[in-house]
Amino acid sequence: MYDVSTRKRALALVAQGRSLNSVSKEVGVSRFAIRAWQARIDPIRRSGRPCPRCQEHPEPPDAPEMYSYLLGLYLGDGCINLHRRGVYFMRIVLDNAWPGVIDECESAMRSVRPDNSVCRVKKQGCVAVTGSSKHWPCLFPQHGPGKKHERTIALEPWQQAIVDAHPWDFIRGLIHSDGCRITNWTTRLVAGERKRYEYPRYFFSNKSDDIRRLFTDTLDKVGVEWTTLARGSDPFNISIARKASVALMDTHVGPKH
């Protein structure tokens, strides 16, 4: 947002007979903005709701079930970066192969910060769902310098309360970011004949010990059995393969779409 003195200076140059193009270049403001200032010079004040975490008595975010889902997405494939004028951008990078997940991510981001802008930035093979707000660090205190797997990731008590109340939304967010549902196969000897046997399985892969623990702790609370599969010497993969547990995951999560 430009201050009133900048607006007045631009309009004064236009009043001297200067073209919008030349004034735009001199002041460093788009022609569209200058045209808008000719109709209204005073900044439009947004009447959006304040950040629920910055109040004297902090409250949970709007739409806690959507927040739980967005938290899972953020821990898996998200980042928060400081832009100019103290505005932060949250970016969740998602594969183009899953348009339904992209839609859900945008819907969740808009629900958590309904008065802030959200857009999609297309990249090669993926989309960065991006939302701007001064309060992303308040809502996602896991934000910090460095990679997530190289620093401690722990939920605040108020976040844990939301995850406990909406565990499946959190699990879906993690699966939609760093997980998948696949069909495994093996062979069995049946009446002397070897036959192929297929079965569904869920995987979640993340380098952060803390994020994997948040995932498995939540699985424990909803009754899903899981195992750790090491990639070499690194236990990056969480596997869900037991029939009853896969059925639970299919009911509440399902394949990416």
Image (cartoon, grey):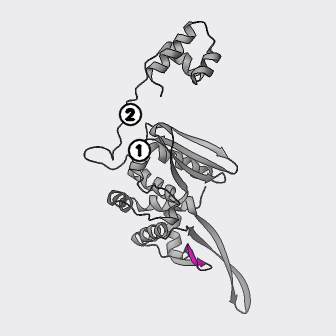
- By secondary structure, the bulk of the magenta-drawn segment is best described as strand
Residue 29: x and y in percent read: 57, 24
- Residue at numbered disc 2: 48
**Residue sitting at x 63%, y 68%:** 182
The residue at the far front in this view is 26
Name which of mark 1 and mark 2 comes first in the sequence.
Answer: 2
Question: What crowding class fits label 1: few (fewer than 14 Cα within 10 Å), some (14-19), or many (20 or more)?
Answer: some
Is residue 231 shown left or right of residue 153? right
Q: In this view, does 234 lie above or below 103?
A: below
**Residue sitting at x 44%, y 51%:** 66
Q: In this view, does 170 lie above or below 42?
A: below
State the residue in front, 1 or 10.
Answer: 10
Residue 118 is inside the magenta segment: no
State the residue in front, 253 or 22.
Answer: 22
The residue tagged with tag 1: helix, strand or loop? loop
Residue 14: x and y in percent read: 57, 10
Quadrant location of the C terminus? Answer: bottom right
Residue 32 shows which numbered tag? none
Question: What crowding class fits label 2: few (fewer than 14 Cα within 10 Å), some (14-19), or many (20 or more)?
Answer: few
Span colored in magenta: 230-239
In this view, the mark in front (1 or 2): 1
State the residue in front, 151 or 71.
Answer: 151
Q: Is residue 193 above or below residue 228?
A: below
The amino acid marked with disc number 1 is His
**Residue sitting at x 38%, y 34%:** 48
The residue tagged with tag 2: helix, strand or loop? loop
The residue at the far right in this view is 193
- Residue at numbered disc 1: 135
Is residue 60 shown left or right of residue 204? left
